Amino acid sequence: MEGFPRRGPLNGCKRSRAPTAEQRQQMADFLATVQSEAATAKRVGVSRAAVRHFKKTRGKAVPPDPPPFFHPEEEKLLVSFVRTKALLGQGLTRDGFLTCCGEYVAALSLNRQQIARRYFNGKHTPGRGFYFLFLNR
């Protein structure tokens, strides 16, 4: 007796491919005629998840991300700050870096400060996610 059947994908199974441009066009046509997700998926030959993703992103391949808060010149300034600290042998902790970013944002115009609050959940200081994304660039 082998036991219970496995749940989830079997070894060697491939993920379904992303819809082609032709399939995306067909989905747009079918959805424009108020077809259901299931009917559209069946006619086009894609999964229902692909149809839901197509509807959610309004037909774009990738949902748009918000533009970065810091301009490229400001990011270069932050990079040079981190490099200078490392060159001098002064360790820079995550909290120290984020505090420095918060002080920089506090010195900006009121309009940019309001935008920063929208980006950073009501604060001037960015969070851990920003820190890891910034260092991974």
Image (cartoon, rainbow, N blue to C red):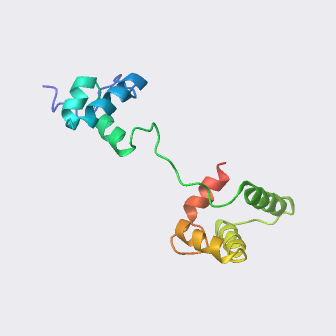
* Quadrant in the picture for the N terminus: top left
95 vs 54, left or right, is right
Tell me where residue 106 appears, x and y as whole percent: 68, 77
123 vs 51, left or right, is right
94 vs 81, left or right, is left
Q: Residue at x 20, y 35 (%)?
A: 35
Q: Residue furthest front?
A: 33
Tell me where residue 104 appears, x and y as whole percent: 72, 72
Seen in the picture, residue 124 relative to 8 is either above or below; the reply is: below
Quadrant location of residue 85? Answer: bottom right
Q: Note whether residue 16 is visible.
A: no
Q: Note whether residue 98 is visible.
A: yes
Q: Residue at x 42, y 25 (%)?
A: 21
Tell me where residue 63 appears, x and y as whole percent: 46, 45
Seen in the picture, residue 117 relative to 132 is either above or below; the reply is: below
Tell me where residue 6 appears, x and y as whole percent: 22, 32
Tell which of 18 and 86 is nearer to you: 18
Tell which of 36 and 81 is nearer to you: 36
Q: Residue at x 22, y 38 (%)?
A: 34
Q: Residue at x 30, y 30 (%)?
A: 29
Tell which of 60 and 29 is nearer to you: 29
39 vs 97, left or right, is left
